[in-house]
Image (spheres, helix red, strand yellow):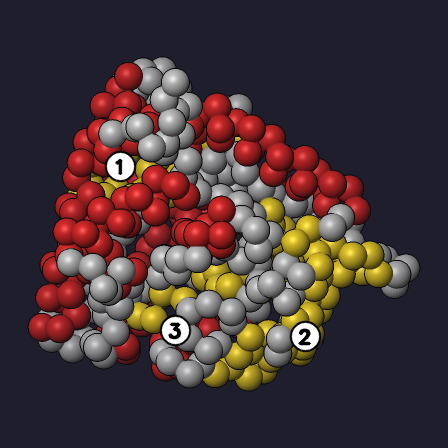
Amino acid sequence: MLTAMSLSFEQKLQNYARLAVQVGLGVKPGQRVLVQAPVDTAPLARAVVREAYAAGASFVDVRWDDDDVQLARFELAPDGTFEQISRWRVDAETETAEAGGAVMAIRATNPNLLGNVDQARVAAYQKAWATYRRPYTAKVMTNRLNWSLISAPVPDWATLMFPDASASQAVEKQWDAIFAAVRADQPDPVAAWQEHLGALKRRRETLTAKQYAALHFQGGDTDLTVGLADGHIWGGGSADTPSGITFTANIPTEEVWTAPHRERVEGVVVSSKPLSYQGVLIDGIRIEFKNGRITAASASRGQDTLLKMIDTDEGSHRLGEVALVPHSSPISRSGLFFYNTLYDENAASHIAIGSAYRFNVEGGIDMSPEDFNAAGGNDSLTHVDWMIGSPEMNVDGITKDGNRESVMRGGEFVI
């Protein structure tokens, strides 16, 4: 019998590519697929391409990215040029989606890549990128296509995670950590994922049935009440496109989440882990809310970047997601900090500044922007998750008649 210890690297990589295609994207025969990948992740990208064709894809294209090329621009390009973007990169996503295809993104970068460049340049670029990409983002936020995010080691990221190891050892350690987090080190990762997704589905259905008016987070320096959108629906694990394709947007995923009410968030919240945002590390985040809007914000590191992100537009002054993750999740138990939100958000409960997912509000996919806002949904060019959960965090569900029910105690579900 194969065990995690007996699987070779090649077997784990193949497992990873297979679950990315079958569980992450849910590729169907005849679909076209776009894979977006940093050049350093080529072995995984190539394995994903082969698995997609094996699943019946009609055409698989790859769009390559490179940290060094991106850094060179922000260091050397002239001022006033950062509103320019490569529209063809976004057009590739949009064209794939409009053709009924699937989009896979391998997100891997040096978490502090842009930490020493002018943040005004970064902010200008991000706003221009998000503005042009908005039609595609709207498809993502409404589950109009099957899409998924995964990751793989890159040397600068690996050495940040494992600073005491050599570069090659750090990459090896990071591969082991990723394989464990995504269950690729198990003999049948697809079966393991189906079991895990079933558990997340039961949890999200339980919370949706409760229809709490609000959640109260208390632990450490956090004392935050998050009102929930009218007719909110909890998500978690897999989802379905309108054509009935089942996909899992994030691998790994340990969360259940829903839409806050944009005008009903009150109190103070403090981050429990750093945030890597657009190549900048932000730590020690402290934010105050009143009537749903951010009234004060600070950070012990990366404050300028945090404030520019909050100032993207009106919606980025409000919350678009609240998510619950048990402290005993596999990523949390590993004791590793990944410097990558795809992993770190699955080690702790978290909130997101910016846009809400339309499918987290009953009927939200077909609502006008005005009706979505009236139900409590939020719209923004940005959506940034950051971690607030800890082993000290307690979460209460507040019912519509004002009663309280225990949802989490000491960072663990008790509901």
Residue 373 seen: no
Q: Which residue is mark 2?
A: 223
Give residue 288's position: percent from left, percent from top. Answer: 60, 79
- The first of marks 1 and 2 along the sequence is 1
Whole-percent x, y for residue 363 in the image: 67, 41
Distance (Cα) linking label 3 and label 2: 21 Å
User: Which structural element holds mark 2?
Assistant: strand
Mark 3 surroundings: few (<14), some (14-19) or many (≥20) residues within 10 A: many
Identify the residue under disc 1: 35
Q: Earlier in the sequence, mark 1 or mark 3?
A: 1
Residue type, mark 1 in image: Val
Pinpoint residue 414: horizontal percent, then vertical percent.
74, 50
- Specify the quadrant that holds the N terminus: top left
Relative to 191, is 202 above or below?
below
Q: Badge 3 is on which residue?
A: 282
Q: How many marks?
A: 3
403 on left or right of 5? right
Regarding mark 3 in the picture, which secondary structure is present there? strand
- Image quadrant of residue 163? bottom left
Looking at the picture, which amino acid does disc 3 mark?
Answer: Ile
Q: Residues within 10 Å of mark 1 (few under 14, many from 20)?
A: many
Asked whether 112 or 408 is in front, the reply is 408
Residue under the image location 69 percent in, 70 percent down: 218
* Eye-nearest disc, 1 or 3: 3
Image point 52% across, 42% down: which residue? Answer: 142
| 205 relative to 255 in the view: left or right | right
